[in-house]
Image: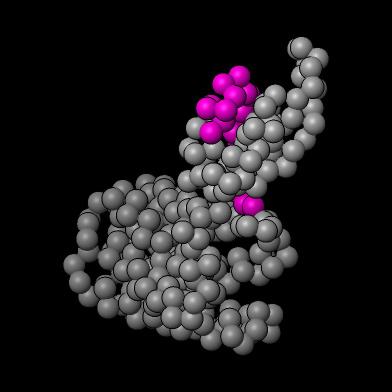
Amino acid sequence: MDIYRLARGRWTRVIFLVGGSVIFGASLGLLLSPNRLATGGIAGISVLLDRLLSLGVGTYTILLNIPLLVISAVVLGRQFVLRTSAAIVLCGLSADRFALLSPLTGDPLLAAVFGGTLMGIGCGLVFLSGATTGGTDIVTKLILRRHPHFQTGRIFLAIDGTVCIAGGIAFKSLTLSMYAFIGLFIFSKVLDTVLYSSEKAKLVLIVTDRSRSLLPLLLSDANVGCTVISVRKGYSGSDADTLMCAMKKHRFHAVRKLVEQTDDRAFMLVLDTNEIYGEGF
Protein backbone atom coordinates (compact mmCIF):
# COMPACT_ATOMS: atom_id res chain seq x y z
CA MET A 1 0.00 0.00 0.00
CA ASP A 2 1.36 3.42 -0.97
CA ILE A 3 0.81 5.62 2.08
CA TYR A 4 1.35 8.77 0.04
CA ARG A 5 -1.50 7.90 -2.31
CA LEU A 6 -3.67 7.02 0.67
CA ALA A 7 -2.93 10.40 2.27
CA ARG A 8 -4.24 12.28 -0.77
CA GLY A 9 -7.86 11.75 0.24
CA ARG A 10 -9.47 14.66 2.07
CA TRP A 11 -10.90 12.66 4.95
CA THR A 12 -7.76 10.57 5.22
CA ARG A 13 -5.75 13.76 5.69
CA VAL A 14 -8.14 14.82 8.44
CA ILE A 15 -7.79 11.44 10.19
CA PHE A 16 -4.00 11.58 9.89
CA LEU A 17 -3.90 15.13 11.27
CA VAL A 18 -6.19 14.47 14.23
CA GLY A 19 -4.84 11.01 15.03
CA GLY A 20 -1.21 12.06 14.66
CA SER A 21 -1.72 15.13 16.86
CA VAL A 22 -3.35 13.09 19.64
CA ILE A 23 -0.58 10.47 19.50
CA PHE A 24 2.04 13.23 19.62
CA GLY A 25 0.31 14.80 22.63
CA ALA A 26 0.10 11.43 24.39
CA SER A 27 3.84 10.87 24.03
CA LEU A 28 4.49 14.28 25.53
CA GLY A 29 1.96 14.18 28.37
CA LEU A 30 2.24 10.54 29.42
CA LEU A 31 5.90 9.71 28.86
CA LEU A 32 8.38 12.47 28.05
CA SER A 33 7.31 15.39 30.24
CA PRO A 34 6.71 13.37 33.46
CA ASN A 35 10.20 11.90 33.12
CA ARG A 36 11.87 15.27 32.35
CA LEU A 37 13.01 14.20 28.90
CA ALA A 38 13.56 17.22 26.64
CA THR A 39 13.86 15.39 23.33
CA GLY A 40 14.20 18.53 21.23
CA GLY A 41 12.31 21.30 19.49
CA ILE A 42 9.47 23.33 20.94
CA ALA A 43 8.20 20.23 22.77
CA GLY A 44 11.54 19.86 24.56
CA ILE A 45 11.72 23.55 25.41
CA SER A 46 8.15 23.31 26.74
CA VAL A 47 9.21 20.47 29.05
CA LEU A 48 11.97 22.70 30.43
CA LEU A 49 9.71 25.72 30.91
CA ASP A 50 6.97 23.65 32.54
CA ARG A 51 9.44 22.68 35.26
CA LEU A 52 10.13 26.36 35.99
CA LEU A 53 6.50 27.52 35.90
CA SER A 54 3.83 24.87 35.63
CA LEU A 55 1.36 26.19 33.07
CA GLY A 56 1.12 22.89 31.22
CA VAL A 57 3.53 21.52 28.67
CA GLY A 58 0.85 21.69 25.99
CA THR A 59 0.12 25.34 26.76
CA TYR A 60 3.78 26.24 26.30
CA THR A 61 3.81 24.30 23.05
CA ILE A 62 0.97 26.42 21.67
CA LEU A 63 2.41 29.75 22.89
CA LEU A 64 5.94 29.15 21.61
CA ASN A 65 4.68 28.18 18.17
CA ILE A 66 2.81 31.44 17.54
CA PRO A 67 5.88 33.39 16.26
CA LEU A 68 6.85 30.51 13.97
CA LEU A 69 3.33 30.39 12.55
CA VAL A 70 3.52 34.08 11.70
CA ILE A 71 6.81 33.53 9.84
CA SER A 72 5.56 30.44 8.02
CA ALA A 73 2.39 32.23 6.90
CA VAL A 74 4.53 34.37 4.60
CA VAL A 75 6.70 31.57 3.21
CA LEU A 76 4.61 28.40 3.29
CA GLY A 77 1.13 29.74 2.57
CA ARG A 78 -2.24 30.14 4.26
CA GLN A 79 -3.45 26.54 3.79
CA PHE A 80 -0.33 25.10 5.42
CA VAL A 81 -0.59 27.51 8.36
CA LEU A 82 -4.25 26.66 8.97
CA ARG A 83 -3.53 22.92 9.03
CA THR A 84 -0.46 23.37 11.20
CA SER A 85 -2.34 25.66 13.61
CA ALA A 86 -4.99 22.96 14.02
CA ALA A 87 -2.31 20.33 14.65
CA ILE A 88 -0.50 22.52 17.20
CA VAL A 89 -3.69 23.23 19.15
CA LEU A 90 -4.67 19.54 19.11
CA CYS A 91 -1.16 18.50 20.21
CA GLY A 92 -1.14 21.07 23.01
CA LEU A 93 -4.61 20.27 24.31
CA SER A 94 -3.93 16.52 24.11
CA ALA A 95 -0.64 16.87 25.98
CA ASP A 96 -2.26 18.83 28.81
CA ARG A 97 -5.20 16.42 29.07
CA PHE A 98 -2.95 13.35 29.09
CA ALA A 99 -0.72 15.03 31.70
CA LEU A 100 -3.65 14.87 34.12
CA LEU A 101 -3.42 11.07 34.03
CA SER A 102 -0.80 8.94 35.74
CA PRO A 103 2.41 8.57 33.68
CA LEU A 104 2.71 5.29 31.85
CA THR A 105 6.11 4.67 33.42
CA GLY A 106 8.59 6.23 35.81
CA ASP A 107 11.53 4.58 34.08
CA PRO A 108 13.25 7.21 31.89
CA LEU A 109 14.66 4.58 29.54
CA LEU A 110 11.23 3.11 28.81
CA ALA A 111 9.86 6.65 28.51
CA ALA A 112 12.57 7.51 25.97
CA VAL A 113 11.97 4.38 23.89
CA PHE A 114 8.18 4.45 23.81
CA GLY A 115 7.88 8.23 23.94
CA GLY A 116 10.21 8.58 20.96
CA THR A 117 8.29 5.88 19.10
CA LEU A 118 4.87 7.45 19.67
CA MET A 119 6.16 10.92 18.87
CA GLY A 120 7.67 9.67 15.60
CA ILE A 121 4.41 7.98 14.58
CA GLY A 122 2.32 11.02 15.49
CA CYS A 123 4.61 13.51 13.79
CA GLY A 124 4.84 11.34 10.67
CA LEU A 125 1.06 11.12 10.34
CA VAL A 126 0.72 14.88 10.74
CA PHE A 127 3.40 15.40 8.07
CA LEU A 128 1.52 13.10 5.71
CA SER A 129 -1.61 15.19 6.21
CA GLY A 130 0.22 18.21 4.80
CA ALA A 131 0.75 19.93 8.16
CA THR A 132 3.35 19.84 10.94
CA THR A 133 3.27 19.77 14.73
CA GLY A 134 5.07 23.13 14.81
CA GLY A 135 8.46 24.06 16.23
CA THR A 136 11.27 22.20 14.55
CA ASP A 137 8.71 20.79 12.12
CA ILE A 138 8.22 24.24 10.59
CA VAL A 139 11.97 24.83 10.36
CA THR A 140 12.34 21.39 8.78
CA LYS A 141 9.60 22.18 6.27
CA LEU A 142 11.44 25.34 5.27
CA ILE A 143 14.70 23.41 4.84
CA LEU A 144 12.99 20.71 2.76
CA ARG A 145 11.64 23.35 0.38
CA ARG A 146 15.21 24.19 -0.58
CA HIS A 147 16.73 20.72 -0.09
CA PRO A 148 13.99 18.13 -0.81
CA HIS A 149 16.52 15.28 -0.95
CA PHE A 150 17.32 15.63 2.76
CA GLN A 151 15.71 13.02 5.01
CA THR A 152 13.31 14.55 7.50
CA GLY A 153 14.40 12.53 10.54
CA ARG A 154 18.04 13.50 10.12
CA ILE A 155 17.18 17.19 10.02
CA PHE A 156 15.26 16.78 13.27
CA LEU A 157 18.18 14.91 14.82
CA ALA A 158 20.65 17.69 13.97
CA ILE A 159 18.47 20.57 15.19
CA ASP A 160 16.97 18.97 18.28
CA GLY A 161 20.25 17.67 19.67
CA THR A 162 20.92 21.13 21.04
CA VAL A 163 17.72 21.03 23.10
CA CYS A 164 18.68 17.60 24.51
CA ILE A 165 21.97 19.05 25.74
CA ALA A 166 20.18 22.08 27.16
CA GLY A 167 17.81 19.76 29.03
CA GLY A 168 20.71 17.95 30.68
CA ILE A 169 22.18 21.28 31.76
CA ALA A 170 18.87 22.65 33.05
CA PHE A 171 18.05 19.50 35.02
CA LYS A 172 21.71 19.10 36.09
CA SER A 173 21.67 15.51 34.91
CA LEU A 174 23.85 14.11 32.18
CA THR A 175 21.87 10.86 32.48
CA LEU A 176 18.60 12.57 31.54
CA SER A 177 20.33 14.22 28.59
CA MET A 178 21.54 10.83 27.35
CA TYR A 179 18.06 9.34 27.73
CA ALA A 180 16.69 12.31 25.78
CA PHE A 181 19.15 11.58 22.97
CA ILE A 182 17.95 7.97 22.91
CA GLY A 183 14.37 9.19 22.58
CA LEU A 184 15.37 11.66 19.87
CA PHE A 185 17.24 8.99 17.90
CA ILE A 186 14.27 6.60 18.06
CA PHE A 187 11.93 9.44 17.11
CA SER A 188 13.98 10.27 13.99
CA LYS A 189 14.14 6.62 12.89
CA VAL A 190 10.43 6.02 13.40
CA LEU A 191 9.61 9.27 11.60
CA ASP A 192 11.68 8.27 8.57
CA THR A 193 10.02 4.83 8.62
CA VAL A 194 6.53 6.37 8.56
CA LEU A 195 7.45 8.83 5.80
CA TYR A 196 9.69 6.73 3.59
CA SER A 197 8.96 3.02 4.15
CA SER A 198 6.34 2.91 1.39
CA GLU A 199 8.92 4.25 -1.09
CA LYS A 200 11.46 1.49 -0.52
CA ALA A 201 11.85 -0.78 -3.50
CA LYS A 202 14.25 -3.15 -5.22
CA LEU A 203 16.47 -2.59 -8.23
CA VAL A 204 17.42 -5.93 -9.80
CA LEU A 205 20.12 -6.35 -12.45
CA ILE A 206 19.91 -9.72 -14.21
CA VAL A 207 22.78 -10.82 -16.49
CA THR A 208 21.44 -13.61 -18.69
CA ASP A 209 21.95 -15.42 -21.98
CA ARG A 210 18.21 -16.11 -22.20
CA SER A 211 16.75 -12.62 -22.19
CA ARG A 212 14.37 -13.46 -25.07
CA SER A 213 12.70 -16.12 -22.93
CA LEU A 214 12.93 -14.28 -19.64
CA LEU A 215 11.84 -10.79 -20.69
CA PRO A 216 8.22 -11.66 -21.67
CA LEU A 217 7.76 -13.54 -18.38
CA LEU A 218 8.98 -10.58 -16.34
CA LEU A 219 6.71 -8.17 -18.22
CA SER A 220 3.58 -10.31 -18.11
CA ASP A 221 3.78 -12.77 -15.20
CA ALA A 222 5.71 -10.62 -12.70
CA ASN A 223 4.29 -7.35 -14.05
CA VAL A 224 7.56 -5.43 -13.75
CA GLY A 225 9.15 -3.08 -16.25
CA CYS A 226 12.57 -3.87 -17.67
CA THR A 227 15.33 -2.10 -19.52
CA VAL A 228 17.56 -4.29 -21.71
CA ILE A 229 21.28 -3.45 -21.75
CA SER A 230 23.69 -5.30 -24.07
CA VAL A 231 26.87 -6.31 -22.22
CA ARG A 232 29.97 -8.45 -22.68
CA LYS A 233 30.99 -10.90 -19.96
CA GLY A 234 34.44 -10.19 -18.55
CA TYR A 235 35.56 -13.79 -18.01
CA SER A 236 34.25 -15.55 -21.12
CA GLY A 237 34.09 -12.55 -23.41
CA SER A 238 30.68 -13.69 -24.68
CA ASP A 239 27.79 -11.34 -25.33
CA ALA A 240 24.81 -11.25 -23.00
CA ASP A 241 21.96 -8.98 -21.89
CA THR A 242 21.44 -7.27 -18.56
CA LEU A 243 17.81 -6.75 -17.60
CA MET A 244 17.41 -3.78 -15.25
CA CYS A 245 14.16 -4.05 -13.31
CA ALA A 246 12.77 -1.65 -10.71
CA MET A 247 9.96 -3.04 -8.56
CA LYS A 248 8.14 -2.81 -5.27
CA LYS A 249 9.57 -5.12 -2.63
CA HIS A 250 6.62 -7.53 -2.65
CA ARG A 251 7.23 -8.40 -6.32
CA PHE A 252 10.83 -9.49 -5.83
CA HIS A 253 10.07 -13.08 -4.81
CA ALA A 254 8.12 -13.72 -8.03
CA VAL A 255 10.92 -12.19 -10.14
CA ARG A 256 13.56 -14.30 -8.44
CA LYS A 257 11.53 -17.47 -8.98
CA LEU A 258 11.04 -16.72 -12.70
CA VAL A 259 14.77 -16.08 -13.18
CA GLU A 260 15.74 -19.33 -11.43
CA GLN A 261 13.23 -21.33 -13.49
CA THR A 262 14.22 -19.77 -16.82
CA ASP A 263 17.99 -19.45 -16.51
CA ASP A 264 19.65 -21.20 -13.58
CA ARG A 265 23.00 -19.71 -14.64
CA ALA A 266 21.79 -16.11 -14.59
CA PHE A 267 23.62 -13.61 -12.39
CA MET A 268 21.41 -11.37 -10.25
CA LEU A 269 22.44 -8.22 -8.43
CA VAL A 270 19.76 -6.99 -5.99
CA LEU A 271 19.87 -3.46 -4.60
CA ASP A 272 17.69 -1.65 -2.10
CA THR A 273 16.48 1.74 -3.29
CA ASN A 274 14.78 4.34 -1.12
CA GLU A 275 12.90 6.24 -3.81
CA ILE A 276 11.70 5.58 -7.36
CA TYR A 277 9.91 8.17 -9.49
CA GLY A 278 8.30 7.84 -12.89
CA GLU A 279 5.65 5.83 -14.69
CA GLY A 280 4.27 2.97 -12.62
CA PHE A 281 5.51 4.34 -9.28
| 169 within the magenta span | no
Q: Quadrant of residue 268?
A: top right
Q: Residue at x 81, y 15 (%)?
A: 237
Q: How many marks?
A: 0
Q: Residue at x 44, y 76 (%)?
A: 12
Where 72 falls versus 125 (above or below)?
below
Q: Is residue 22 visible?
A: yes
Percent of width and height locating residue 147: 71, 61
- On the picture, is 146 further left or further right than 50? right
Where 204 falls versus 123 (above or below)?
above
User: Which of 262/234 is in front?
Assistant: 262
| 265 within the magenta span | yes
Q: Quadrant of residue 29?
A: bottom left
Q: Quadrant of residue 43?
A: bottom left
User: Which of 37/187 is in front?
Assistant: 187
Where 120 falls versus 226 (above or below)?
below
Q: Residue at x 36, y 60 (%)?
A: 118
Percent of width and height locating residue 210: 67, 27
Percent of width and height locating residue 78: 61, 87
- Residues in magenta? 258-276
- On the picture, is 167 further left or further right than 142? left
User: Which of 57/19 is in front?
Assistant: 19
Q: Is residue 39 visible?
A: no
Q: Residue at x 22, y 75 (%)?
A: 100
- Quadrant where the image shows the C terminus: bottom right
